[in-house]
Amino acid sequence: MIRKKIIKPKKVVKKAVKKPKLEKSKEEPIILQGLRGMKDVLPQDQSYWEQARRVAEKLARDYGFSRIDIPLVEFANLFTRNIGAGTDIVEKEMYAFTTRGGDKVALRPEFTAGICRSFIQHGMNVLSKPVKLFSIGPVYRYDRPQEGRFREHYQANYDAFGEEDSILDAQIIQLAHRFTQNLGIKNIQIQVNSIGCPICKKNYNSLLVNYLESKKNKLCQDCKRRLENNPLRALDCKEDKCFQVSAAAPQSVDHLCEECRTHFKTLLEYLDELDLPYSINSRLVRGLDYYTRTVFEIYSGTEDAKKNSLGGGGRYDRLIKTMGGEDTPAIGFAIGLERAIAEMKRVQAKPYKSPKPRVFLAQLGNLAKKKSLKLFSELEKNGILTAESFGRGSLKSQLKIANRLGVELTLILGQKETLDGTVLIKNMATGAQETVSADKLVDAIKKKLKTDNVIVLHNNNHE
């Protein structure tokens, strides 16, 4: 018998594979400062911002403007098509990027194009004319930061649609003037010009290009490039050599068609009637392609001193139609809030003065601390502006705070008062003290403060 030799398979010994050591990824340190050209508005500056916001919103109401808020982000071609491909904003200053979904978008560099998009999208053309819209908020331009010009800056923006008469131009300019006056900026200069309608603007552009071509060797590089797509901006250039060339350039007001000439002449008559401090600046063109006819700018400072531009605007009668809407004349302007606030500080204009509390709530002990939250809420609900220092245990330290705030009454809630359901009212001027029942406290405070002078911050619906 032949026996078969059974060969057992050899055990395969797996060699341990050494895993490479994973290097700990080095985290980038947090940079504890804002991006260049973007700044924080600190508490000590908020009184100026509050004043600017209040003035902007009150004038919007007084002049019949309704509030509209539009997105920070729009499709990029909304700006490239309507602001103008040859403008500085589109060429150098837009924050444009592609989303994960492949949409080409941009942070808004100004308000007007987005408001016009909203006007068309939501069928506002059926509303009674003029349709007046007010906006306030940030805009973004990737420009070299400089004094009064930030990459994120805030504007108060006013637009009116549906009226071609120059009386609306005069009212808008009056509104811009009133805005700065109400901020406490008194020395205001208004510069106005007319760049005509598309017909006379085209003829004037040809004349201007011919002139600038003859002086091309004296222009800066930007203005040489502008000759092809935005020759009007050469008139607005701040370079000394370009300024000298533009001084002798043809003036748009001398080449207006009859209709535009009449429109501008009537505007000046309205401005004279309003007794506004204006002058005609033939080099004033604004930087965006959509402007027609009236353009204007607001400056602070006397004619002899350095003038600071605070904002401006003009007509854009063809923009709505160009974007696909009905033929709708329009005019608008914007004020740069950073510049306006800087000017307020320069001329020492008064900022907003917030109401000061007239009552201080002091509490002593854990039980009183628990009850004080509900008491504070009751005072707030009744419109009594009350200060407090929750968490501070010492009554002495709380009374020091009350003295520093200059309140008239201090309410003291201690262990005894909490158990008795009472509150001690201390007159900070005389030192006199009175104990009142907690359920009668609000009436007692109003009586002591003289009801007519109580600072009421909320209405009954807490809106």
Image: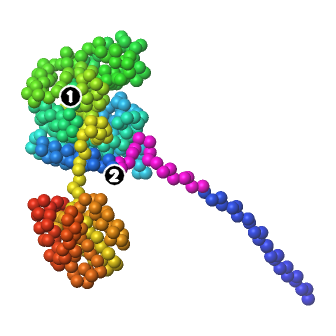
Q: Which sits in the foreground, 460 or 451?
A: 451
* Sequence-earlier tag: 2 or 1: 2
Which quadrant would the N terminus be assigned to in this image?
A: bottom right
Q: Is residue 222 left or right of residue 293?
A: right
Pick out the residue farthest to the top. Answer: 214
Q: Is residue 122 magenta?
A: no
SS for tag 1?
strand
The quadrant of the rendering that contains the C terminus is bottom left
Rendered residue at 25%/29% (across/down):
301
Residue ID at (30%, 66%): 399
Graded by Cα atoms within 10 Å as few (under 14), some (14 to 19) or many (20 or more), the crowding at tag 2 reads: few
Q: In the image, which disc is placed on residue 444?
A: none
User: Does residue 79 appear to the left or right of 268 in the view shown?
Assistant: right
Q: Residues within 10 Å of mark 1 (few under 14, many from 20)?
A: many
Provide residue 284's location: percent of width, then percent of height: 26, 24
CA separation, marks 2 and 1? Answer: 33 Å
Q: Is residue 188 left or right of residue 101?
A: left
Magenta residues span 26-43
Residue at x 16% of width, y 37% of height: 178
